Image (cartoon, grey):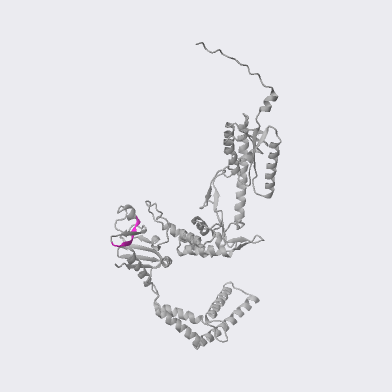
């Protein structure tokens, strides 16, 4: 069988006009960006969009592949520019042939980002035209120019960033701070721009702070708010523990503002770091109306530190037990006298009944390797011992009743011919005495000071006469005496000692309970008192 004969066919060249007619239109996209969200910049953004739309649509060789634009987003990084990243994804999907942008600084002010993205796009055959610099990245010598101009743009951005940061720090030192009250839960802005308290939401804030100090965990507060159907700061029905934590840590709720909480480490691309002393901070007190007292805010901060220090050191548990829990007051108060580790509540299941005990976490996790002699404490005898220790520090019943009845007599109804109670008269005398002493310390002189000295003396003399008259009348006031007597009788019948275990009461009174041995504990109260107590069977 012979080989087939070779056939050669000549394909003629096509005329230029015919080739141009068959040429596919380039899919051209434009990228626009403005640096801020000010009104004048927004008009610039709209102008850029209009300009590129007209430019692409009026060119017969181009077809629109999209206008990608980011408003008010940083130019130092591409991570937060959604439209920029969407444009890059479309380039990778082969849906864009050419990109138009105003300048290198609009594309990116980070030299590394500029080079990386232009290289990546050029490898895919996609060019970027920077109109201001008249550069097309598909040209062979374009990369050197882009590197130089990109470095200039980055240096300019870093300089602006430093100037802005310096200006903000100077403003903070002068007490000028900006607080976004529109997003601060519990506050509203009046028409004149002055912040005011939203009474309904402020009650929620107070509840959060008060329950936390009372011993509730973040989880328990979250459950309470969700169960009550209260909307969170975003207007949604579900609260999160992170939201509760951010409210508890925010000093703005006591009317203060702490400036320079964070700072940006390094230049472009640097991470925002918490300021733990690297830079000076400025605390501006009484900047705006307070929802809670400053004392309550600082009590929450101290409680947070205490809970953090009280976390269990267990490294083996993966059930979350090592984190703070307020279901049981002793979970963060009962410590081993030998190794100092917290105790943990355990349930032992016996053949006949369950047994609730407390055991050293070190013994639970590592046996006798680090803690050799820590005893296991039965819950009921342990609780009785702690209550017995507290009862030893209760004042005698007679003293309590006497103090209460004396207070009732002083605050009883005003006597005839007087608009003040005995207690109110005493408090007014104390106020005038303090004012008199203050004037003496200031060495006040002159006619006005002399008149005030005389006024105080006359008022105090009258109040003392009134005090004697009210006291005498109260002794003869049958109605007041009968009221106090009935209350005294009721108090005599009450037992003011602690007989029932109350988790919240223990949190308020007890700081730490140290297990010395199986039959001996040491109770440390919040006022610094130490009580040694035996533990019965």
Q: Which residue is nearer to you in this view: 185 or 178?
A: 185
Q: From the top left corner, tell me how far across and down residue 283 is, in percent.
A: 56, 58
* Apparent side of residue 61 relative to residue 457 in the rendered image (left or right): right
Outermost residue to the bottom: 476
Where, by quadrant of the figure, is residue 23 drawn?
top right
Where, by quadrant of the figure, is residue 175 drawn?
bottom right
In reply to whether residue 353 is colored magenta, the answer given is yes
Q: From the top left corner, tell me how far across and down residue 494 is, in percent.
A: 40, 78
In reply to whether residue 93 is colored magenta, the answer given is no
Q: From the top left corner, tell me how far across and down residue 299 is, in percent.
A: 48, 63
Q: Quadrant of the C terminus?
A: bottom left
Magenta span: predominant SS is strand
Outermost residue to the top: 2
Vertical comparison of 420 with 260: above or below: below
* Apparent side of residue 49 relative to residue 273 in the rendered image (left or right): right
Name which residue lies at 34% across and 53% down.
365
Name which residue lies at 58% across and 14% down.
7
| Region rendered in magenta | 352-361
Looking at the rendered structure, the number of numbered marks drawn on it comes to: 0
Vertical comparison of 465 with 445: above or below: below
Q: Which residue is nearer to you in this view: 40 or 372?
A: 40
Vertical comparison of 165 with 114: above or below: below
């Amino acid at each position: 069988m012979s080989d087939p004969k070779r056939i050669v066919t000549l394909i003629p060249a096509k005329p230029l006009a015919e080739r141009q007619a068959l040429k596919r239109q380039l899919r051209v996209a434009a990228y626009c960006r403005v640096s801020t969200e000010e009104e004048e910049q927004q008009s610039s953004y709209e102008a850029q969009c209009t300009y590129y739309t007209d430019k692409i649509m009026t060119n017969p060789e181009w077809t629109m592949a999209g206008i990608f634009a980011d408003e008010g987003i940083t130019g130092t990084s591409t991570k937060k520019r959604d439209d920029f990243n969407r444009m890059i994804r479309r380039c990778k999907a082969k849906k864009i042939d050419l990109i138009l942008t105003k300048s290198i600084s609009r594309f990116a002010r980070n030299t590394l980002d500029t080079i990386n993205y232009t290289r990546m796009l050029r490898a895919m055959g996609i060019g970027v035209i920077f109109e201001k610099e008249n550069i097309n990245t598909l040209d062979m010598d374009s990369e050197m120019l882009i590197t130089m101009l990109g470095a200039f743009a980055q240096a300019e951005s870093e300089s602006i960033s430093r100037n802005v940061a310096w200006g903000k720090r100077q403003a903070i030192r002068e007490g000028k701070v900006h607080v976004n009250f529109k997003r601060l839960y519990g506050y509203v802005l009046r028409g004149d721009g002055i912040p005011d308290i939203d009474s309904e939401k402020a009650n929620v804030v107070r509840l959060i702070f008060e329950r936390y100090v009372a011993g509730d965990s973040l989880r328990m507060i979250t459950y309470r708010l969700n169960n009550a159907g209260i909307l969170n700061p975003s207007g949604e029905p579900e609260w999160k523990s992170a939201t509760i934590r951010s409210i508890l840590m925010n000093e703005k709720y006591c009317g203060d503002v702490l400036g320079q909480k964070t700072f940006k480490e390094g230049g472009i691309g640097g991470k925002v770091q918490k300021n733990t002393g690297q830079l000076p901070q400025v605390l501006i007190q009484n900047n705006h109306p307070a929802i809670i007292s400053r004392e309550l805010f600082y009590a929450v901060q101290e409680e947070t530190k205490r809970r953090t220090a009280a976390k269990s050191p267990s490294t083996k548990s993966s059930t979350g037990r090592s984190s703070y829990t307020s279901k049981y007051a002793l979970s963060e108060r009962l410590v081993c006298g030998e190794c100092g580790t917290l105790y943990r509540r355990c349930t032992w299941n016996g053949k006949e009944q369950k047994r609730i005990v407390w055991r050293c976490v070190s013994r639970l996790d590592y046996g006798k390797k680090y803690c050799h002699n820590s005893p296991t404490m039965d819950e009921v005898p342990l609780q009785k011992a702690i209550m017995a220790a507290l009862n030893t520090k209760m004042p005698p019943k007679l003293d309590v009743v006497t103090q209460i009845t004396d207070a009732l007599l002083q605050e009883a109804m005003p006597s005839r011919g007087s608009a003040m109670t005995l207690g109110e008269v005493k408090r007014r005398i104390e106020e005038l005495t303090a004012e008199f002493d203050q004037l003496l310390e200031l060495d006040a002189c002159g006619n006005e000071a002399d008149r005030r000295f005389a006024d105080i003396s006359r008022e105090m003399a009258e109040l003392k006469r009134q005090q004697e008259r009210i006291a005498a009348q109260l002794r003869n006031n049958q109605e007041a005496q009968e009221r106090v007597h009935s209350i005294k009788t009721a108090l005599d019948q009450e037992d003011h000692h602690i007989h029932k275990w109350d988790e919240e009461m223990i949190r308020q009174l007890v700081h730490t309970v140290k297990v010395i041995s199986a039959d001996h504990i040491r109770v440390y109260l919040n006022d610094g008192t130490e009580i040694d107590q035996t533990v019965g069977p």
